[in-house]
């Protein structure tokens, strides 16, 4: 409380006490004089001795008068005490009120100084839009005096007006670019309705956000520039990829065709070396494209239902030739307790498996690679890729998931590569909300574990796989290599069979004599040894040999030797189940030379190939002819449309059209649109597949949007082409994955 206020209050209280004391003193003097006058009268009466004077009566009256005076004095004293108490209460209330008034004046002063000194602009307007209050910042903004603005309409020189946002409580927010004495400035306004003595008013608070807006605009410009650069980079990579893939397609395809011709061992070695170099270059292109897509933030997921087990088995089949060329095994096991169909991005999961299993094959010189898919915790899917390769040191385990990092980074390293494969795999797994871990022991191989959250997606659209009931049946597996044999035993064990693995023909012969066996699975190398020693035991009803695709030429001899059927490695669960059913018969496969006979007989497909590159056209023609079909090649989209129309008019329409996307004149997309427009309304449209050296998702989407039913990536792979042809003819159960 201020000193001046305290002194004035004390002086007022002192004056009040003095006045009260004077009043009391006066009353006391009067009463005292009255008593004294009465006493003096009594004394005078006694002295004078008048006749009619009664001293006793006079004394009594004086006594009564004295008593009354005392009572009056006592009453006055009591009233004085009451007044003093009330006065003290009033003084306390007055002092408290003065303190509150002082605090209010202090708070008002603080608020006024705060409003006036802050940088935010504050202005209040009445219902008619006239300014009723504004702080100094507002006057500085407008460059006008207080008297020129108060009571007048608000007028700001607005250069740009941003969108207005209204919050749930009625607050209006918007940005304005206002011309000021210092130049154009951006202000962010918040306007609310407030109550005052004059009624409802609108109070606006504006904050200078010029720096923020400038930063946002600079960031937006930088983002646009970065996106433009990213698009330019993507176009550049796509163009470079296409230009590299086009001649690479011819190199790899011609190498395959050359390997089908009679060659000396030395020539075979050279051709395989050239093909391996081309495949390495192709893998490098794929990794660079994937990494650039991830860096650009364009790693999108296409989540939809897919069949889990067939996807895993297809990946293993794609990698099998590479593993078998190195003399190692590759096999997979998918737990049947998992849902048959799950929700997810099948293409990305396939890429993860190809990267991990392909990397395992690269670093494995003996033994093999296994891919085990089973249920993890809760609804997680756990994929374990295990190899018997060189292994990793503990300090290298975390580093191999970094970009451009390898376990052996020295200039003398044995294994090459970009160091991007595992980094890309890790990014994809994390994008799928999963995790990847690696464990390894030097010299004992490595295990990569991928855990992904998945959900069941209902039943398969086609006939579901039905596992055979082998309860109590004994099956002997004869194989020197253990990986595929152990996974086969695990699969048969789930079906109820009792299994045993023999590592050589001698052990197998000893076991065959110990009990009655219902099934015998023999790996081809050991089957050859068993053939040299004698025919396999005919007492076993199901005698099955396991072969590689390159060993099909031995099927006739194996059949003559007494084997009842065969399985191509890596073995599919459905194929294994089919071979173990009693109705199974020994099947043979047509060799490429025999397929040519099929083509000559007119039983193959009629295929139109639109390809502008002469080498790729020659390759496609040769592959189709070797696979038993009738190709016709045209050089651009316009020629493709003409050829399609001529065949249609002649009553001999094409069964399949392979359409290159990038061609001079009319490209494959426009040609496909014209074909679809011409056959609009027909129940069965012509099957058209895109041929493209670009592996981007945009190319696939563009092909599907134009009316194509799938996409084959160049270099054209024989197995993938065969799948497409089988899907077209309806003779195969595989579907083309774009």
Image (cartoon, rainbow, N blue to C red):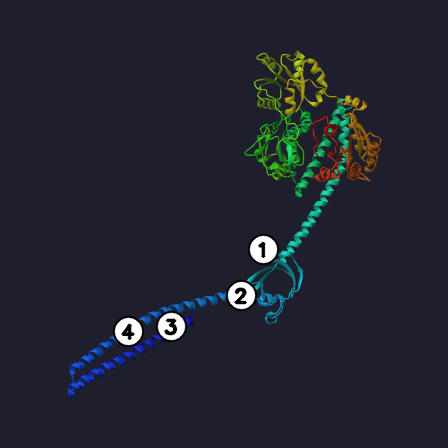
Mark 1 and mark 2: Cα distance apart in space = 22 Å
Q: Residues within 10 Å of mark 1 (few under 14, many from 20)?
A: few
N-term mark: 4 or 2: 4
Could you tell which of marks 4 and 3 lies nearer the N-terminus?
A: 3
Q: Residue 612: percent from the left, percent from the top?
A: 81, 36
Question: Can you give x and y, in whole percent of width and height, for residue 347 in the image?
Answer: 66, 35
- Gap in angstroms between the C-alphas marked 3 and 2: 38 Å
Residue denoted by label 4: 77
- Residue 567, labelled with which disc? none
Which numbered dot is residue 196?
2
Residue 571 visible within the image: no
* In the rendered image, the vertical position of residue 174 relative to residue 516, given as above or below: below
Which quadrant would residue 372 be assigned to in this image?
top right
Indicate the secondary structure of the residue bearing disc 2. Answer: strand
Image quarter where the C terminus lies is: top right
Residue 388 image-quadrant placement:
top right
| Between 190 and 360, the one nearer to me in the picture | 190
- Considering the image in quadrants, where does the N terminus appear? bottom left
| Left or right: 312 in relation to 194 | right
Q: Quadrant of residue 38?
A: bottom left
Rendered location of residue 423, percent (x, y): 63, 38
Residue 137 x/y as whole percent? 59, 65
Q: Which residue is mark 3?
A: 10
Q: Earlier in the sequence, mark 3 or mark 2?
A: 3
The secondary element bearing badge 4 is classed as helix
- Label 1 belongs to which residue? 167
User: Which of 356/500 is in front?
Assistant: 500
Q: Is residue 568 above or below residue 296?
A: above
Decide: is 413 above or below 92.
above
């Amino acid at each position: 409380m201020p000193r001046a206020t305290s002194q004035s209050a004390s002086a007022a209280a002192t004056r009040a006490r003095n006045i009260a004391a004077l009043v009391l003193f006066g009353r006391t003097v009067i009463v005292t004089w009255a008593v004294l006058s009465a006493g003096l009268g009594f004394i005078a009466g006694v002295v004078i001795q008048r006749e009619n004077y009664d001293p006793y009566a006079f004394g009594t009256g004086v006594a009564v008068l004295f008593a009354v005076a005392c009572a009056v004095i006592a009453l006055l004293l009591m009233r004085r005490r009451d007044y003093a108490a009330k006065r003290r209460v009033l003084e306390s209330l007055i002092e408290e009120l003065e303190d509150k008034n002082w605090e209010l004046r202090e708070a008002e002063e603080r608020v006024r100084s705060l409003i006036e000194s802050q940088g935010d602009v504050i202005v209040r307007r009445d219902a008619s839009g006239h300014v009723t209050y504004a702080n100094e910042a507002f006057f500085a903004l407008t460059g006008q005096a207080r008297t020129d603005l108060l009571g007048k309409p608000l007028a700001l020189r607005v250069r740009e007006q941003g969108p207005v946002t209204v919050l749930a409580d009625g607050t209006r927010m918007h940005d304005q670019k206002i011309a000021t004495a210092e130049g154009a400035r951006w202000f962010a306004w918040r306007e609310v309705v407030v109550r005052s003595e004059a009624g409802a008013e609108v109070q606006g608070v504006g904050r200078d956000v010029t720096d923020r807006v400038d930063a946002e605009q600079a960031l937006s410009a930088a983002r646009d520039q970065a996106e433009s650069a990213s698009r330019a980079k993507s176009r550049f990579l796509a163009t470079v990829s296409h230009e590299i893939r086009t001649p690479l397609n011819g190199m790899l395809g011609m190498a395959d065709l050359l390997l089908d011709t009679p060659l000396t061992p030395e020539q075979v070695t050279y051709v395989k070396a050239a093909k391996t170099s081309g495949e390495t270059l192709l893998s490098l292109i794929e990794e660079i494209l994937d990494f650039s897509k991830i860096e650009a933030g364009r790693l999108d997921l296409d989540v939809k239902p897919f069949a889990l087990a067939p996807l895993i088995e297809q990946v293993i089949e794609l990698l099998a030739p590479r593993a078998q060329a190195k003399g190692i095994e590759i096999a997979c096991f998918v737990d049947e307790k998992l849902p048959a169909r799950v929700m997810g991005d099948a293409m990305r999961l396939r890429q993860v498996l190809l990267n991990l299993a392909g990397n395992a094959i690269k670093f494995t010189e003996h033994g093999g690679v296994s891919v085990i898919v089973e249920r993890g915790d809760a609804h997680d899917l756990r994929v374990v890729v295990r190899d018997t390769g060189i292994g990793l040191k503990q300090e290298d385990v975390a580093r191999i998931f970094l970009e451009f990092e390898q376990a052996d980074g020295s200039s003398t390293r044995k294994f090459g590569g970009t160091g991007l494969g595992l980094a890309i795999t890790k990014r994809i797994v994390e994008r799928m909300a999963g995790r990847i871990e690696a464990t390894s022991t030097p010299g004992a191989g490595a295990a990569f574990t991928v855990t992904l959250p998945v959900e069941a997606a209902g039943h398969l659209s086609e006939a579901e796989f039905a596992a055979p009931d082998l309860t109590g049946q004994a099956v002997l597996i004869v194989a020197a290599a253990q990986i595929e044999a152990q996974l086969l035993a695990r699969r048969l064990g789930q079906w109820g069979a009792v299994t045993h693995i023999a590592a050589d023909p001698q052990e197998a012969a000893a076991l065959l004599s110990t009990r009655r066996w219902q099934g015998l699975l023999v790996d081809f190398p050991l089957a050859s040894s068993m053939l040299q020693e004698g025919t396999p035991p005919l007492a076993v009803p199901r005698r099955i040999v396991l072969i590689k695709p390159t060993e099909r030429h031995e099927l006739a001899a194996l059949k003559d030797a007494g084997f009842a059927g065969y399985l191509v490695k890596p073995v599919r669960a459905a194929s294994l189940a089919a071979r173990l059913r009693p109705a199974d018969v020994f099947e043979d496969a047509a060799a490429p030379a025999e397929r040519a006979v099929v083509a000559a007989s007119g039983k193959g497909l009629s295929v139109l190939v639109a390809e502008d590159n002469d080498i790729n056209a020659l390759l496609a023609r040769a592959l189709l002819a070797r696979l038993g079909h009738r190709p016709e090649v045209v050089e651009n989209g316009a020629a493709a449309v003409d050829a399609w129309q001529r065949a249609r008019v002649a009553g001999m329409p094409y069964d399949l059209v392979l359409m290159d996307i990038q061609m001079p004149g009319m490209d494959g997309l426009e040609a496909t649109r014209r074909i679809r427009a011409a056959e609009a309304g027909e129940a069965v449209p012509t099957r058209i597949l895109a041929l493209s050296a670009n592996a981007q998702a945009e190319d696939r989407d563009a092909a599907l949007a134009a009316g194509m039913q799938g996409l084959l990536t160049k270099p054209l792979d024989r197995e993938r082409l065969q799948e497409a042809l089988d899907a077209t003819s309806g003779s195969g159960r595989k579907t083309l994955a774009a």
